[in-house]
């Protein structure tokens, strides 16, 4: 009877120690407060607004006063075939980006290592890094200056060779290829840095030993460099897969976003959502597509993280 | 690090090379040269054309070397007057946003890697979750415009770029490299956690501050997206959104009327675009060679965990 029930006593001591924990780390908590407020204001506060995807949005009534329509907005975009088309385009472009990005980055990194002149390597690396630093708006203008049919460089050259001008801004077909090439142009300098660092991290003695054993350049690449890059490649590929439904909006929008002849061929989820929000003020449809994308994206990241945790626990995100 | 790499290359080059080594080395020089030239070629076109007369651009197209050198387009951009206001605005946004963002990210990043901070996992997850699941554009747009009433307010550009979970995680990784013993010795001296952070940790965190600061600054300088959402009716625009408007309004004008009905050649739209592009991007082109190593630091410290 006199023994204290440990189960009853526990809440007090837990509470007490929690209070103590908070008091002892009050400064560290306060140091996190600006960031916490920030994320509440700009990342968590928009979350309840997702409800707009389930209503027929009416400006005067607001999100929560508008009539509830259930999954109608989702059905509308799904039944029109639009949702499937957007998903397919977004995923296919990302697959092309992921495969070609890494392939080209590995090739560039391997070849950079072959450059013996330090100055040459530094200068060329700096030049290849430039496209990473410019805004997507400028990328759009650069592409326009090269490709437009009236004044573009491509047609200046074609004209000099006596060829007919190509009207690339009036036909959608070549744009998937153009977008992929521009993406590679912009990102390869940046992407190759990780691989170059990994190659430079290979023990010089291993390479030297292989050369003493008479390995030729291809054998060195095949049996030493590529295997040592494999973990990096696998991890980067996996994380890229986690973002497979997230499109590179800035690139697409600035290359083709304003031109319906072009964007119909290469429309991605982000462009549709942006148009629906900014041009059509169709917040309900935009939010339905956005929520669909967020959910798939969430599932992809969770899945990828689980896989990474299995093969390389050090690299898992959580 | 760089020293070691070069030593490695030197030692390799002492070993006898096979024929295939020379082949791949040759391919390397050719391929890398071509890629490097292709990387800057479009800029050279813009640069060359920005000094060309409008008549020549319309008649003969863009050019690497101006056929008739003129600074008319630059004069026009500068005479318009508002470009300096745009510069001022962009600089103010970049400096304020970067400084406040750096302060918040470094403070949080430091606290979240402290092993004796019992709430670090919970808060880390709270921060990280924001990159896992987002509300999407429409709810965000509605909140910003109708909840916070930030339409046509520069706050709508300043605030959203200031902090991100990625930058906090990057900072956290940098802060991990500051020896924990320093924090401990600060505690023994009786300093509070904030004092320790400001006077002991921050000075040690310089590489991290440089990297995160440059990512922030580049984000602000190149910002056009938030502006396109919220600053549509402003007269003074951030530089890249200004370029965005000039590019898109001129090209949409051209695309819609061009070769069909109207002679647009009296509007020097082409050379104007080029000159504006050079003026809005110039500072980056001059600065990036000196700061690129900090971005490389960012890639290697935070690449995967980004």
Image: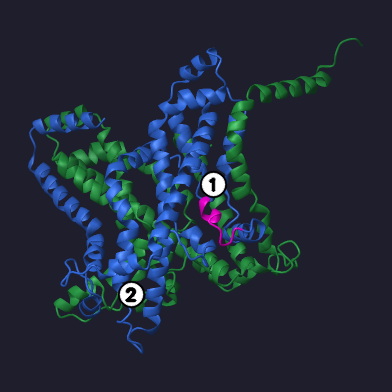
Q: Which residues are magenta?
A: B150-158
| Mark carried by residue B95 | none
Task: Classify residue A121 as left or right of residue A192.
Answer: left
Q: Where's residue A218, x and y in %?
A: 17, 43
Compared to residue A96, the image places residue B252 above or below, namely: below
Q: Which residue is mark 2?
A: B269
Give coordinates of residue A271: x percent, y percent: 49, 65
Magenta stretch holds residue B156: yes
User: Which labelled disc corresponds to residue B131?
Assistant: 1
Number of residues whose C-alpha sits closer than 10 Å to that of mark 2, classed few (under 14), some (14–19) or many (20 or more): many
**Quarter location, residue B149:** bottom right
Q: Nearer the viewer, residue B202 or B180?
A: B202
Rendered colour, chain A: green
Task: Locate the C terminus of chain B by quadrant.
Answer: top left
Q: Judge by depth and name the residue closer to the eye, A42 or A117.
A: A42
Find numbered disc 1 in the image and state the secondary structure of the residue it sits on: helix
Which label sits in the foreground, 2 or 1? 2
On the question of residue A105 being in view, the answer is no
Provide residue A28's location: percent of width, then percent of height: 59, 28
Counting residues from the N terminus, which is met first, the one under dot 2 or under dot 1?
1
Which chain did the renderer colour blue?
B
Is residue A3 toward the left or the right of residue B17 in the image? right
Residue drawn where x is 59% and y is 69% of the image: A78
Q: Chain of mark 2?
A: B
x and y percentages locating residue A214 in the rendered image: 11, 34
- Give the quarter of the image for residue A149: bottom left
**Screen quadrant of the N terminus of chain B:** top left
Is B206 magenta? The answer is no
Q: Tell me what residue is drawn at x 51 percent, y 55 percent.
A: B157
Q: How many marks?
A: 2
């Amino acid at each position: 009877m006199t023994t204290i029930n440990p189960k009853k006593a526990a809440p007090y001591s837990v509470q007490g120690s929690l209070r103590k924990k908070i008091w002892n780390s009050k400064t560290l908590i306060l140091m996190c407060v600006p960031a916490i407020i920030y994320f509440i204001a700009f990342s968590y506060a928009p979350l309840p607004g997702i409800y707009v995807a389930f209503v027929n949005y009416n400006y005067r009534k607001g999100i929560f006063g508008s009539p509830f329509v259930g999954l109608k907005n989702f059905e509308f975009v799904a039944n029109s075939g639009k949702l499937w088309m957007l998903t397919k385009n977004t995923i296919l472009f990302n697959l092309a980006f992921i495969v070609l990005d890494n392939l080209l980055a590995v090739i560039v990194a391997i070849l950079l290592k072959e450059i013996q002149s330090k100055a040459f390597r530094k200068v060329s690396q700096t030049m290849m890094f430039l496209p990473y630093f410019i805004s997507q708006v400028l990328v759009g203008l650069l592409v326009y200056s090269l490709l437009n049919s009236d004044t573009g460089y491509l047609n200046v050259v074609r004209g000099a060779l006596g060829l007919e001008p190509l009207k690339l801004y009036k036909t959608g077909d070549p744009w998937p290829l153009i977008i992929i090439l521009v993406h590679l142009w912009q990102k390869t300098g940046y992407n190759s840095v990780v691989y170059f660092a990994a190659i430079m991290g290979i023990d010089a003695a291993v390479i030297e030993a292989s050369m003493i054993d008479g390995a030729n350049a291809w054998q060195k690449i095949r049996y030493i460099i590529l295997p040592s890059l494999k973990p990096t490649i696998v991890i980067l590929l996996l994380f890229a897969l986690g973002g497979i439904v997230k499109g590179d909006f800035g690139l697409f929008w600035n290359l083709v976003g304003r031109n319906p002849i072009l964007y119909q061929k290469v429309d991605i989820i982000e462009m549709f959502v942006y148009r629906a929000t900014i041009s059509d003020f169709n917040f309900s449809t935009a939010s339905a597509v956005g929520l669909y994308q967020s959910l798939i994206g969430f599932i992809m990241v969770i899945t990828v993280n689980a896989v990474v945790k299995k093969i390389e626990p050090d690299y898992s995100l959580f | 690090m760089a020293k070691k790499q070069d030593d490695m290359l030197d030692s390799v080059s002492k070993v006898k090379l096979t024929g295939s080594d020379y082949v791949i080395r040759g391919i390397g020089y050719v391929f890398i040269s071509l890629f490097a030239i292709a990387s800057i070629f479009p800029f050279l076109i813009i640069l060359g054309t920005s000094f060309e007369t409008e008549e020549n651009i319309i008649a003969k197209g863009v050019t690497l070397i101006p056929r008739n050198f003129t600074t008319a387009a630059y004069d026009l951009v500068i005479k318009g007057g508002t470009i300096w206001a745009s510069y001022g605005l962009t600089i103010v946004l970049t400096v304020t946003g970067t400084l406040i963002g750096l302060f918040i990210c470094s403070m949080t990043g430091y606290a979240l890697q402290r092993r004796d901070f019992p709430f670090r996992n919970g808060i880390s997850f709270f921060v990280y979750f924001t990159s896992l699941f987002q509300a999407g554009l429409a709810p965000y747009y509605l909140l910003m415009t109708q909840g916070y009433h930030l339409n046509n307010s520069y706050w709508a550009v300043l605030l959203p770029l200031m902090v991100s979970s990625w930058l906090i995680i990057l900072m956290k990784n940098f802060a991990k490299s500051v020896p924990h013993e320093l924090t401990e010795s600060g505690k023994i001296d009786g300093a509070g956690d904030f004092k320790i952070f400001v006077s002991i940790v921050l000075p040690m965190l310089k590489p991290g501050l440089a990297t995160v600061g440059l990512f922030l600054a580049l984000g602000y300088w190149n910002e056009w997206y938030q502006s396109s959402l919220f600053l549509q009716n402003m007269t003074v625009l951030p530089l890249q959104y200004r370029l965005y408007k000039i590019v898109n309004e001129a090209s949409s004008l051209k695309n819609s009327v061009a070769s069909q009905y109207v002679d647009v050649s009296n509007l020097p739209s082409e050379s104007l675009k080029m000159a504006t592009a050079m003026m809005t991007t110039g500072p980056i082109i001059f600065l990036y060679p000196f700061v690129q190593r900090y971005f490389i630091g960012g890639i290697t410290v935070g690449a995967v965990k980004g």
